[in-house]
């Protein structure tokens, strides 16, 4: 290799080195300070988006066990009503399910948000104790469980109102049909349990009318 070529390589290396060092330093800092900036949150354990979701009774991903295994939620089904060719009867029934789900999830989400705010405040004010912590986290855990159950059960009820073709189409529209996707395989396995349709749907409708 000529001396001129070696000199060019050395120059390029000297120019690139500072950039590589800065990049490595930034990565190290990110690894060492993964929560940097989060201290400005109103509730440290929740992002602004998560707070908004709880306040509005939205799912926050709590129903992914259903959604990604072939059990659509009522909100997204209604959003895709035209593409799924919902009948008037299906649309009416699923709208009722959505309204009922929201009426249950909204107060639960707001209570959970309030409980998280109280827990955060106890740490801010240095009033937290082991006994208080146990009581508060147990209450938060119970509310989280109830909120998750609420969203999941309405996914379960919604699935019984759709045909296998509609379930498959839903998975396609939502992008769940990649090779190996369990949601695509499950779209055929929900309907054989359609005997649960009437009791499940009846139960949900009963909860709607009783509110």
Image (spheres, rainbow, N blue to C red):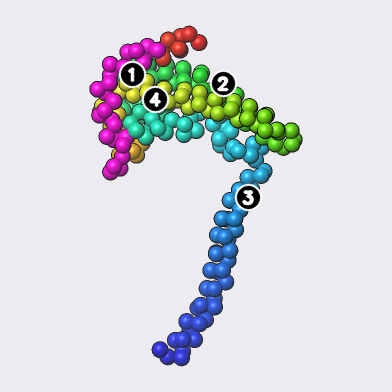
Marked residue nearer the N-terminal end (1 or 2):
1
Q: Secondary structure at mark 4?
A: helix
Q: CA distance from mark 4 to mark 3?
A: 37 Å
Q: Residue at x 55, y 23 (%)?
A: 108
Q: CA distance from mark 1 to mark 2?
A: 27 Å
Disc 4 versus disc 1: nearer the observer: 4
Q: Which residue is mark 3?
A: 36
Q: CA distance from mark 1 to mark 3?
A: 48 Å
To which quarter of the image does residue 162 belong? Answer: top left
The image position of residue 58, as x and y in percent, is: 50, 28
Marked residue nearer the N-terminal end (1 or 3):
3
Q: Residue at x 28, y 43 (%)?
A: 179
Q: Which residue is mark 1?
A: 90
Report if residue 166 is visible in the image: no
Disc 1 versus disc 3: nearer the observer: 3
Q: Which residue is mark 2?
A: 107
Q: Secondary structure at mark 1?
A: helix
Marked residue nearer the N-terminal end (4 or 3):
3
Q: Is residue 209 magenta?
A: no
Q: Which residues are magenta?
A: 178-203
Q: Residue at x 67, y 29 (%)?
A: 131
The image position of residue 188, as x and y in percent, is: 25, 29
Disc 4 and disc 3 in contact, CB within 8 angstroms: no
Marked residue nearer the N-terminal end (3 or 2):
3
């Amino acid at each position: 290799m000529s001396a001129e070529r070696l000199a060019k390589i050395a120059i390029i290396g000297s120019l690139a080195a500072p950039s590589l060092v800065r990049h490595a330093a930034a990565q190290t800092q990110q690894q060492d300070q993964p929560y940097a900036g989060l201290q400005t949150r109103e509730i440290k354990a929740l992002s602004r988006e998560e707070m908004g979701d709880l306040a509005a009774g939205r799912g926050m991903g709590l129903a992914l066990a259903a959604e990604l295994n072939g059990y659509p939620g009522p909100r997204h089904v209604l959003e895709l009503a035209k593409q799924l060719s919902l009948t008037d009867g299906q649309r009416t029934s699923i709208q009722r399910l959505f309204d009922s789900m929201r009426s249950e999830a909204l107060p639960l989400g707001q209570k959970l948000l309030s409980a998280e705010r109280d827990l955060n405040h106890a740490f801010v004010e240095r009033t937290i104790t082991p006994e208080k912590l146990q009581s508060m986290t147990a209450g938060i855990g119970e509310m989280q469980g109830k909120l998750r159950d609420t969203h999941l059960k309405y996914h379960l009820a919604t699935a019984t109102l759709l045909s296998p073709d509609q379930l498959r189409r839903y998975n396609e529209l939502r992008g769940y049909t990649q090779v190996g996707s369990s949601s695509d395989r499950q779209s055929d396995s929900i309907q054989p349990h359609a005997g649960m349709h009437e009791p499940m749907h009846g139960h949900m409708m009963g909860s709607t009318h009783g509110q």
